[in-house]
Image (cartoon, coloured by chain):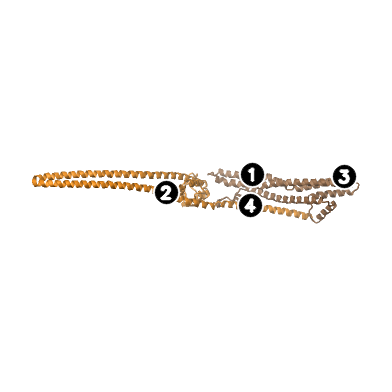
Chain colours: A orange, B brown
Amino acid sequence: MRISQDLKKLGIYSLAGLFSLALHGFVIFLLLVGWTGKNTEPKPKRPNFVQATLVQMAPQAKAENKQAADNKAKAAAQKAAAQKKAEKQRNEKARKQRVAEQKKAERKKAEQKKAREEKIRRDKALKKKQAEEKARKAAAQREKEEQEKRAKEAKREKELERQARAQALASALDSEDEFLADEQNEQVSQGYQSYIQQRIIANWNRPLSARRGMEAILSIQLVPTGQVVGVSVVKSSGNDAFDLSVQQAVKKVGRFEKLQELSRQSPVIFEQNFRQFRLVFRPEDLRL
Amino acid sequence: MPEQQLSILSLVIGASVPVQLVMLILLIASIVSWLMIGQRWWYLRQMNGGFRAFEANFWSGVDLNDLFRDGSLRISDNETVDGVENVFRSGFREFNRLTKNEDTDPDAVMEGTERAMRVALSREEEKLNTHLPFLASVASVSPYIGLFGTVWGIMQSFRGLATMQQATLAVVAPGISEALIATAMGLFAAIPAVLAYNRFSADADALYSRYDTFSDEFTSILHHRVHSG
């Protein structure tokens, strides 16, 4: 009687124990499986986002650039065409003037020749010298006139040159503006580069064999969320452990949060500088 | 990087020995307390059902001698007789034994019967309250044990931080994370234990008071019998 009661009690206890064990096993299983499941969930969302931004962003930037460039080119072409026209007109005027002057000179020559022939007829020997002198004078005059013409032409050419220079200056100014903008972008991107470097150093476990002055060049690919999608060593430091540790540091960072803001604010800078970029990893503040 | 994500398992395995010990203690405490919870739940349900059935049987106008004999039969059939029926049986047995002598004073009979029932009642109360102290101590102590594990783990990880050259969050974070698991486990063990303790002690109290009421009623019935018979 006693034994059977004890057995029954034991049965209840073992049932309860089984229930308890099953519950704990279930909870632990949920923890182990559910944890990783949650982490893999947001993963497929990322590529969508990246694709969307990618498709929209690149053509926009290009189109803007193209439009701006087209406008500039058009304006420049128009200017150039107007200047060419003006030059042509000026040249034509000059030619006409020259032709008229030449005609005048020819008429004068003809008259002079006639006079000379008459004089020659009147006094052949004596007046030949005078005629020759006159001819010389006329030649001198012609030379003077030609010189004046040349001077005028030179002046015109100088003016043209000046205009060309002004134009060149203006275009140079334009390009300088662009250059300044580029420089600003570069400053911004340098700030982000130092941020990236800091993040990598923060996640870097220094291998024992690392020495001061080691330097590895990495190629890192990011997507607009700042997520690292690829990292490879372009130029090795000569120490495999060092290279590997740097690569692991980049992978450990996983995502550069600030770059997501950057890619939102100015996608162009992101596309130009951080879609794929090289990074010189050179930790100098090591106590080695 | 999913492969570098710290899994709970790796954190537990990588924890220091005292923290692992704490986790083991808490796991065992949790398992045992759930065992107790299961057993108590089953027992109290049975007692409740048994009390209702017995009470219905008792007030259905059945002869008390038949009721007593029925219980005796069941005991001889290797079945358990529990709860309020034990109170009834011990009281009734004592009453019958005392009333066999015609000379016995009715008050003495009642006194002996009441004493026997009180003894049975206190035994039943003891049965109702078994394991509840264990649940209570798990409920109150396991958060502290978990906290101890956490404090120890954080201590260790900060000590490790002191010797580091580059003090970053990434260096301390795994240590703190693994240490916090101990607190989580403590709470995991404590919360069900608290709930179960409160629930079961309230149930046991209610059941005991009903036993008490029944024993009073039974006493009054016997009292009638003594004085009328």
Judge left or right: residue A143 versus residue B212: left
Q: Decide: few, some or many residues near mark 4? Use Cα within 10 Å; few <14, some 14-19, many ≥20.
A: some
The percent position of residue B193, horizontal first and vertical second, equals 69, 47
Q: Which amino acid does label 4 sit on?
A: Ile
Q: Using the numbered discs, state the Cα–Cα distance from disc 2 to disc 3 in whole angstroms.
A: 113 Å
Q: Which residue is drawn at 81% across and 52% down?
A: B57
Q: Using the numbered discs, state the Cα–Cα distance from disc 1 to disc 2 in whole angstroms.
A: 61 Å
Question: Are circles 1 and 3 on residues that touch, CB within 8 Å?
Answer: no
Q: Using the numbered discs, state the Cα–Cα distance from disc 1 to disc 4 in whole angstroms.
A: 20 Å
Q: Residue B108 carries which label?
A: 3
Front of the two marks 4 and 2: 2
Secondary structure beneath dot 3 equals: helix
Q: Which mark is residue A65?
A: 2
Question: Are circles 4 and 3 on residues that touch, CB within 8 Å?
Answer: no
Q: What residue type is labelled 2?
A: Asn
Secondary structure beneath dot 1 equals: helix
Using the image, name the chain to which the residue with label 1 belongs.
Answer: B
Please give the residue where the numbered disc 4 appears in the rendered image: A28
Using the image, name the chain to which the residue with label 4 belongs.
Answer: A
Secondary structure beneath dot 4 equals: helix
Q: Decide: few, some or many residues near mark 1? Use Cα within 10 Å; few <14, some 14-19, many ≥20.
A: many
N-terminal of the pair, mark 4 or mark 2, is 4
Q: Which residue is drawn at 23% across and 44% down?
A: A149
In the picture as drawn, the residue positioned furthest to the right comes out as: B103
The percent position of residue A204, horizontal first and vertical second, equals 52, 47
Front of the two marks 1 and 2: 2
Q: Residue B147 carries which label?
A: 1
Callout 1 and callout 4 share a chain? no
Callout 4 and callout 3 share a chain? no
